[in-house]
Image (cartoon, coloured by chain):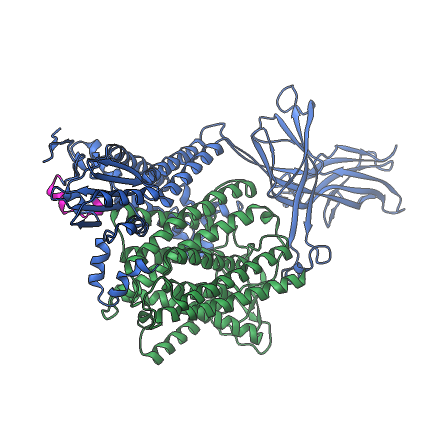
Chain colours: A green, B blue
Amino acid sequence: MTQLASLSSTLLYVAFVLYLIATAFFAGSIKSKKHTNQTGKNRWATIAITITIIGFVSQLGYFITRWIASGHAPLSNLFEFITFFGMMLIAAFIIIYFIYRAHVLGVFALPIALLIIAYSSMFPRDISPLIPALQSDWLAIHVSTVAAGEAILAISFVAGLIYLLKDVDLAKKGKQTFWLEAVLFSLVIVVGFIAATTTSQITGYESEFSHINTEGNEDVAEYHLPALVIPHQGELVTENRFASPVEMPAIVNASRLNTVIWSIMVGTVLYLLTRLIFRRSISALLQPLVRKVNLNLMDEVGYRSVLIGFPVFTLGGLVFAMIWAQIAWTRFWGWDPKEVWALITWLFYAAFLHLRLSRGWEGNRSAWLAVIGFAIIMFNLVAVNLIIAGLHSYA
Amino acid sequence: MSEITCKCGHVNPEGTELCLSCGRALTTDAEEKKTSDVMRYEGMARRSQTYNGSIIDKVWNFFSSVKVGVWLIVITLSASALGTIFPQVLFISPLEAPEVYYEERYGVAGEIYYILGFHDLYNSWWYLLLIAAIGTSIIIASLDRVIPLYKALKHQRVNRHASFMKRQRIYTEYPLYSSDTFSKIKDGLRNKRYRIREEDGNLLAEKGRFSRWGPYVNHTGLIIFLIGAMLRFVPGMYVDEVMWIREGETMAIPGTDQEYFLKSEGFTVETYDADEDKEVFGATIDRVGAIAKNFQTDAILLKREDGVAGDSSNLVEVEEHPIRVNQPFKFDNFALYQVDFRQGEFRSMSFNLVQKESGDSFGPFEIDLTQPEDEYQLDDDHRVELMGYYPDFSGFENGEPQSPSPVPNNPAFLFKLFSPEHPDGEVAFIAIQQNLEPLGENDYQLSFNGVETRDVSGLTVRKDLTLWILALGGAIFMIGVVQGAYWNHRRVWVKRTEEGGMLVSGHTNKNWFGLRKDLEAAFTNTGLEQPKDQHEQNLNKVSAGGAKEEENRDTTS
């Protein structure tokens, strides 16, 4: 079983590398002088999508072997869920790719999936047993459907981002230029988080603070990055470790906030370096990639993925969720923060569809809505688990 | 009612935008609107767009507006998000007073949160009002649209006026009409599963009309769901009770009118074991410590045969059933859920009566902490009388021992000890770690002999007769949303002009890419170029860069 578990990790690693290679080929497919068309047959793109599919199969292998090794669907903590979300994003991309054959989607969808998978592996990766509340077939049914729905909706973000990169006139300083850069900056922060965490994992940095928690009891907080903020009445226990004098109130999880500060710092440094080296904003840097993009097609891809993703999300995030909640938590709805945010996501995309169908919000506006929708999904995926404590805090 | 007569002679009801017969725009307003806006409801007269006189008209018009609907959705979602900033009052311990809790924990922000009532946001009158407004909007907006839309699609004419054709997004004028080309297009579309109608050499090909009903079907589902949610407040539809049952205890199940009783045979907690369970779990168990594997109450359901309520003498065993998390015990519309437990509650304590001087011991005797007896006879000469019992002893007040609850968390006793030396008894007060002799030094004392503990299961008793309505609403919603999202309503018109030319236009409610593909297939054998997407062309004119590649985009895929 432990052998199977290590095979599983290897397969995930292989998938990650393959997605990375495929991204390069997709980039080649739209750069290639010989193949000026952005869609349709193109040797670079054929190689790229083939590698993507092999990567997907490898990741599917990770999923299945981990399932066998643990005896339950590997969807029970943040690492497993976010990895699966990344896999579903790849699957959704492959499907949309075969409908529209738009190579440029690969140039953006794959890096975002890579970012998501890398992000997931910052959380504990051990195979853990299921607590009683999770021991149900609904774990596999509910969680996988939610992930699939959110991943399909995320494709609309990818299409929207491409749309905006081409559509927004970067020469003009304005709200759109600013916010587009802000969206890209937030992606760089995720890179910052991954860089900071990976460095600490490699160096094995660790420090502990004794502190007073919200209940007024003594507790120990673990830090994996030098402490820029310390917990409420925190005392450094580990020797020869850095501790700043900035103390947080008890309701703030200082260790997590510390990680957030580090991520933003590293991300900002990376961002500034890019700007210094290329002397251009990231939006401007990416713009040549989308110069030949057909805006109409991107608009349609975005809309289509919302249309496909919305029913899947409703089924997984609300219908299956309610059925399981009735079985496990005695009531189908209980205003748990995760439930509320699933409702918010659902309401948001309902508004998206109404604006599009009845008020003619297409193109630029629709693309912005897709970006906001993805931000809501990410908030529910990450922040609700880490910041807002609730029934869904499993990791 | 003022009717509108079209140039073609057809008489249309007031408010119509496109003639029901030929499709001409009837008002200058309709002419100037974007085609996609007019075609959305087929240019039909809608009540909300036609009348605006009475109060009823105004209310109707307000709720029928999608703009209003979207605002209601956006307000509701923002409000819902507000409710997750701090925990809702239902998540904080019932022992905490909310008016103190929020301020103590979250400072001024928490205080404001509490004062504004956000701590119980989802039960606030204004939140419920928002939901009600959305419900009203769904009903009115749907009715306002579905009826005219149904009529329009049912009475479609094949032959449309040239102006109608021209303003469609997909439109091309071909110089020559031939019946050969016509039948090729017709067959091509038929192969793509279009339903074909033909009239004097004109064609209407249509498919997926039923997807237009999707929104109205899913709105019906939502309304049924909301009605189901309201029915919870009808007495008898919904039971939500908590019961704490001790091991070995039999008690009436709350909410069943004393008809059903439950006996707990025992409560078990299991944790994962690094040796017994899968080896791969080892790392996690090392990292986080013990992980719960199972919470289980072994229960027996009993039913009262006859007799008065509360009488537990005539109980008949119905079923023995374990209650586990994720595996509730269901019976007769009720379900029992394992939700909580308390381990190691004191069940009984036993003592010996000891003569201090000689050390002679009498007893032991055991006191059941939930049903203590008044007197314990130890032998012919020695007995102990229980004068006072304080199951949850918290201290003395004015010399009186206090017990804030009947739960034996910290039992204390006031005894009178009878012996041959003291036929009138000696008084002793005993609590955990405490031994008082309030009326002077005694010759006898009680020595602690042992304690027995037991577990208590916390169960939720639930009955919810609204579930099937909610399930029905949910199912209808899903059907409707899939119907509307996964199918498209596509139409193609072919018109023979008096000059011998041919007009072809197409419209779809969404997925233009799909319609273009259908047309591409239908036109391959005709030798004609497929009808153009005017929207696409306009866009290409705007984007100077890669226009060339984009034009041959469809032919290369």
- Where is residue B213, by image quadrant? top left
Residue B547 horizontal/vertical position (percent)? 24, 64
Q: Main secondary structure of the magenta part?
A: helix
Whether residue B450 is visible here, answered yes or no, is: yes
Question: Which residue, as the protein is rendered here, is positioned at the far front?
Answer: B180
Identify the residue at horizontal 69%, vertical 22% (top origin). Answer: B314
Q: Is residue B49 left or right of residue A350?
A: left
Residue B333 vs residue A229, the one in the foreground: B333
Along the line of sight, the residue nearer the viewer: B271 or A303: A303
Nearest the eye: A108 or B391: A108
Q: Indicate the quadrant containing the N terminus of chain B: top left, top right, bottom left or bottom right.
A: top left
The percent coordinates of residue B329 (x first, y second) are: 62, 36
Q: Is residue B509 above or below residue A191?
A: above
Q: Is residue B129 visible?
A: no
Residue B516 location (% of width, % of height): 29, 51
Please check the rendered image and state whether residue B318 is part of the magenta-colored stretch, yes or no: no
